[in-house]
Structure formats: C-alpha cells, structure tokens
Amino acid sequence: MNDFSNALSTAFALVTSLDRDLFEIVGLSLEISLTAVLVATIIGLPAGAALALSRFPGRRPLIIVLNALMGLPPVVVGLVIYLLLSRSGPLGSYGLLFTPTAMVIAQSVLVTPIIAALARQTVADLHEEYDEHLRAIGSGPLQRMATLLWDGRFRLLTAILAGFGRAIAEVGAVLIVGGNILHSTRVMTTTIALETSKGNLAIALGLGLILVTLAVSVNAAAMLLGETAHRRYG
Amino acid sequence: MRRRNTKRAWRWLRLSLLVGACLPALAAAESITVASTTSTENSGLFEYLLPKFQADTGIEVRVVAVGTGQAIRVAKNGDADVLFVHHRPSEDAFVAAGYGVKRFAVMHNDFVIVGPASDPAGIKGGDDAAQALAAIASSKSLFASRGDDSGTHKKELSLWQTAGVDPAASGTSWYRETGSGMGATLNTASGMNAYALTDRATWIRFGNKGELVILAQGDPVLFNPYGVILISPERHPHVRADAGQAFIDWLVSPPGQTLIGDYRIDGEPAFFPDAIETPPTE
C-alpha cells in the first residue's frame, strides 16, 4: 500500500510547511471541541453528582437513560439540531445554522451525557467510601456534592477526556450543522471526509495522522497535569 | 492550602468561560451563504473564484456543498442566500414556486460515463449515453449510482428511463447506490471497478481513478448547465439580498465569466461560461 507511506510524508510536509489552512482547521477543531467539553463539564459534573447523591422516584430509569445516551448517534443529534436551528425551525431566528456555534451546541449535546454518566458513577463510588465521614461532619447536600466532586477531580478528568475524545473525533453532527464551509466551519474530521471524497487519500490519511497525534497529545498533557497536581496537592 | 487551590481553580474556570464565550463571536463583517453542489466544490472552482470575488467586493462567500436536491431544500428553508446548482427543471420549479427571484445561466460542462479500462459492457467510444447504459444493464456490469437526489443522480435516472431500464426496481445486484457525493461515488466505482456517470470537472480533479477511464461522452443529452438564483427576500426576509445579488451579478459579468472560462484543472478547461456571447479563451 503506497497510500500509507504517502500519507506519512504528506502529514509531515503539511506540518513542517506550517500550512496556514491546516492551522486554521486544527485551531477551529480544538476551539469547537474544547468549548463543547467546557459546556458539557459545567452541566454534566453537577448533574451527574446530583443524580448520584439524591433519591427520588424514577431515578433508576433516569440513570439507565443517561447511560444509554452516552451512545447517542452523532448523525441523529446533528439532524435534530439542524431542524431546530434551520430558518424554518423553532430557533431559526437566531441564524445559527452553518456557524461554529451550531457545532458547539451539537457536540455539547453529544458530550454532556458522557461526562454526566461517568461523573455519576465516580461520585457514587466515592460516596460509598466517604458516607460515614460526611455524615459525621454533618454536611448539607450541596456541600456534599462539592466535596465529592472535588475529591474525585482526578478521576473526573478521565470522564472529561472521554468527552473530549468523542467531540474531536466525531464527524456526523458537525458536518450536518456546520456544512463544512471553508474558512468558517471546516474542521479536521470534515476535511478528512472531503479529501477522501475527492480521492485525495494520502492527504486524507495524513490529516488523520495529525488528528490522532493531536488527540493523544491532549490526553497525555491532561494526564501529566493531573498526575503532577495529584503528587503536589494529593 | 486547600482554600487557595479552590480559589485558583475558580479563577481558571472563570477565565476559560470568558474565552469560550468570546470565541464564537469571531465572525466576518459581510458574508453570504451559498447552497451549492459537490461538483462545483470538488472541482476546486469555488476555491479559485471566491477569493477574487472577495477581493473585488469585500463580501465573504460561505459555500455549503451538498447534492442539488439537498441544496434546494436548504434554500427553501431559508438557510442560504443564493442557490447555485445544476438541474434546470428543479431550478425553474424553484423560481416558479416563489422561492427564488430569477435564474441566471452561469456556465456549463458535460457529463461523461467512466468505467474500467477492460470495459466488460463494450461501450467504449460510444456517443449515445442511453445506449451505453442499456449495454451496461444487459451485460450486468457493476454501476455505481449517486443515489442522493443530486443533479447528477437526476440526470442518470432520466438516462435510464430513455434506455428503458429500471435499475432500482428490478432487484439488480449490479446497480449500487452509494447515497453520497460525486467524489465518494467515484471512490466506490474505483474500488469495485464499476461504471459511473460523473461531471467532467469532478472527474478531472479526482485523485483516485484506479483503472477507471472515460468510455462514453459527447451525447448532447449529457450537457450540464449550471444556474444561480437569489433566494426570495419576500419569502425569507433575513436573506442578504444585496450581497447575494452582487455575487450573482459578478458571476455573470464579463470579468466573472472570463475567470470561469480561464479555470483549468491539470491544464484542461472545466467549465464553459454561458452568460456572455463569446468564449474568452481559445
């Protein structure tokens, strides 16, 4: 297979030539996925913790649904957000379709259940460990939630990274709501799809290598950061 | 100690929130959205034309490249300002129904039938498109269809009708609908050594030809005209009519038409201007 060696040299050439379009696309990918993960974290962590600590009727079915939502198909999310944001849809007046904002919304919807479900599990496990301790110091529910989230922060990092992995790698949702517009909504995954469809397989594979390298780097950086912090402040 | 960490964490959270909130606001001043087809995008025409238009007018053009059928639906929903497609009957119906203001002829190229060099259906050198398709059907050779309601797909279906073959209904195993864009369909055809109908521009630019070559061309029914239409601002008041019409006027103006005629892919002309009398280059 000649394509693989071609892909390697293409990827190398793209990176070393400091291709402006490439940096724009990589930058937009990171910007959109990191923003989506931030939004999902702000919603998902408290929601997951609340679900772990509270007791109410219908809680178990809700947990099952939440866990199932981790596997939401991106194309379905993309289609639903598309219909909502279209000028003919209920939120059409904001004119958000085919903008980066629409892509952030779609990815947030995809990532929030992942972070919430994993956070719920983490907080539930911690709660079992610390229940007596928390009871002894007589803390209220909100304080409990905050304490457990804070104590589980290094484990929660994994949940957030799982969310980021999902966001940076998906193509179905951003392609539909973003429209893959050059210099506007074109990201790594949609570029790979486009170059594949042009028959430029080496370029597509080269971009794929860059995307995987990027994902590995972000994960490695986060893990190192977490471990360092763990050692210093444990 | 712990309190200070918490404080620091909050500061980071606030900062990242602020950055996150500002990012989507980085948009250009004046821009229009054009719903167009994969063939114009994949051929590289827009990458060539749009920077020149932006330099002339300062208007940024954002292209959403989908099949003609989907592009028309995007336009009907009001999610674009200008429609730029290639299926004349659909374009006329779009304007007649009041979704568009007026159709302008921009350019044309032609469709070609590509297939494996071994040519199991024996259509090589033919210039009757329907006859070629009939030969493909009777020899049960693999055929990769767009199957996506695009302009090329609509053209292909009308050719099958002329050939008197109903490839989809007869439960045929040689007829493969990819349901995707022109390039993706050519990738499939290349992988399966199948025949396919493609516009010439996408074909010239396509980088994964494998054993595929052009086998039949030159039939007048393979003529492929492109039209451009402003979405009706009466139906969709948010349409940027001035900027959209400026784009259309520029496309059909002598400078725009000359640029289209001068566009080359690998030294070959890809599109022929339709809005001015004489072809600009020979």
Image (cartoon, coloured by chain):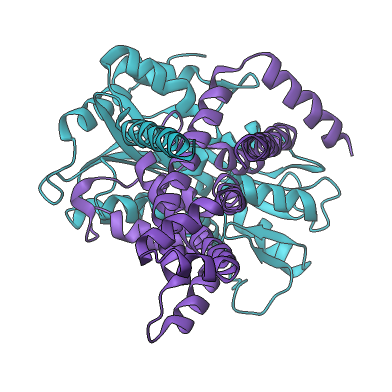
Task: Specify the quadrant of the image occupied by residue A200.
Answer: top right
List the single residue furthest toward the front. A136
Task: Specify the quadrant of the image occupied by residue B174.
Answer: bottom right
Chain with colour purple in the figure = A
For chain B, what colour was chosen? cyan
Is B48 situated above or below A225? above
Which residue is at 28% across, 48% downward? Answer: B79
List the single residue furthest toward the bottom. A57
Is residue B11 or residue B5 the one in the foreground? B5
Is residue B131 or residue B239 the one in the foreground? B239
Which residue is at 31% across, 37% downward? Answer: B33
Where is residue B256 drawn, in percent x and y? 35, 19
Is residue B201 or residue B109 the one in the foreground? B201
Task: Specify the quadrant of the image occupied by residue B6.
Answer: top left
**Drawn side of residue A152 relative to residue A56, left or right:** right
Evaluate whether residue B154 shows in this view: no
Which residue is at 55% across, 57% downward? Answer: B156
**Drawn side of residue A218 relative to residue B272, left or right:** right
